[in-house]
Image: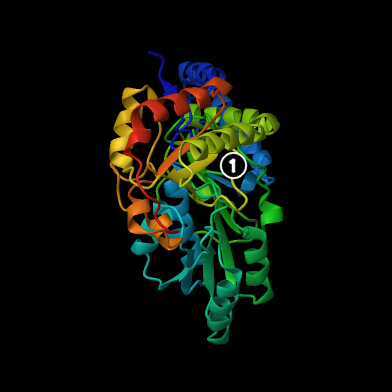
Amino acid sequence: MERIYLDYNATAPVRSEVVRLMAEVMTEGGNPSSVHGRGRKARARVEDARAQVAELVNALPPEVVFTGSGTEATDLAINGVAPANGITDLVLCAVEHPASRGASGQSALPVTDLPVTRGGVADLDAAAHIFDGLAAKGRKAMVMVMRANNETGVIQPVPEIAQMVRDRDLGLVHCDAVQAAGKVPVDAVMLGADTMSLAAHKLRGPQGVGALIVREGVAIAPRICGGGQEMGRRSGTENVAGIAGFGLAAQMAQQSLGEFAGLAAWRDKLEAGLRELNKDTVFFGEGAPRLPNTSCFAVPGVTAETALMLLDLGGLEVSSGSACSSGKVAKNQVLAAMGVPEALKMGALRVSFGWGSEAGHVDRFLDVWRGQVAQMCTGAEVF
């Protein structure tokens, strides 16, 4: 039985071109800090990748700080950039990734939640109220809002929020663009972000490498000190092969943005088919702008844990939401922030298409759902 991977928001299979490049770089060897020929070649690999990643998000190459993951990049923003710039408060959109939640929990700064609408979009009226209150007290905030949610695919109004922060001279804006970069156009200048986190493995690069974009003029205190690599912003010998792979994956993802946008047709076909099988199916964030590849849904009476097992037996690999929950179906903070009833939260599933998806995968999913899962459905839950 052919197995079909529909969990691209968790991680994307590495491009064969990236694998070949990384193997080549690993055989070359060389420390980028060495001044001999092999070291200079390794340095060139890193700097070429820095330019490629910068181009993906319309940043300057010196603004790219390579890290070990998107999570580390976000931690560096919260616990490195924020204290270096006199930030007194953190404001987190209520649907932020666990990476932001975890890093903010390690910070000594007070945290305010920015609520979202029932559609999963940051509430701009609530944002204005929160920002006005902080500005009136003379506080300086780092406002954290992701570009696209990893579970629902909902795209957040980062430019509008960034403008509100600038209008009040409130502080800095951090954008978690891990899920968005390579799938939709991401422009750091247009978004108005002061810092931005990225991860290679979401766009068919290797796992274990990420980047923090730090706008020119924004101070940063390193979290990892030592040899002074990454211009003193993140010490440790660079993962040259991983960074080179990240750069090539970023370049190739940028070139295929138009192709990726076409996945919206398959997402819509999937949702229409599920609704035809059960009219009470709920699609979270359906009315908001979303990533073209992502559908997060629940069917009354169907639990995610059971559905995942049945789908897996049918050769379909999907998830119940964030992939950062220790491999288990856990409490869904994103849907809770959207006001989703408990019974529906327990049934939330996420299908995310990607570069290797095919039109027939939608039909296969619907066939398996019809044959193995649909009989579990019961009455509707109000949402």
Could you tell whether 9 is left or right of 371 in the image? right
The percent position of residue 121, horizontal first and vertical second, equals 56, 60
Name the residue: 41% across, 15% down.
2
Q: Residue at x 43, y 63 (%)?
A: 339
Question: Which quadrant: the C terminus?
Answer: bottom left
The answer to whether residue 222 is above or below residue 66 is below
Q: Is residue 175 left or right of residue 97?
A: right
Q: Work out whether residue 31 can be spotted.
A: no
230 vs 202, nearest the viewer:
202
x and y percentages locating residue 234 in the rendered image: 46, 48
| Quadrant housing residue 104 | bottom left
Q: Is residue 10 above or below residue 101?
A: above
The quadrant in which the N terminus is found is top left
Instruction: Out of 156 and 301, give the one closest to the viewer.
Output: 301
The amino acid type, in three-letter code, at marker 1 is Ala
Instruction: Please state if 380 lies on the left or on the right of 262 as rendered.
Output: left
Q: Which residue is mark 1?
A: 181
Residue 369 screen position, x and y as percent? 41, 30
Q: Residue at x 69, y 45 (%)?
A: 58
Assess disc 1: are there few (<14), some (14-19) or many (≥20) residues with their C-alpha within 10 Å of its C-alpha.
many
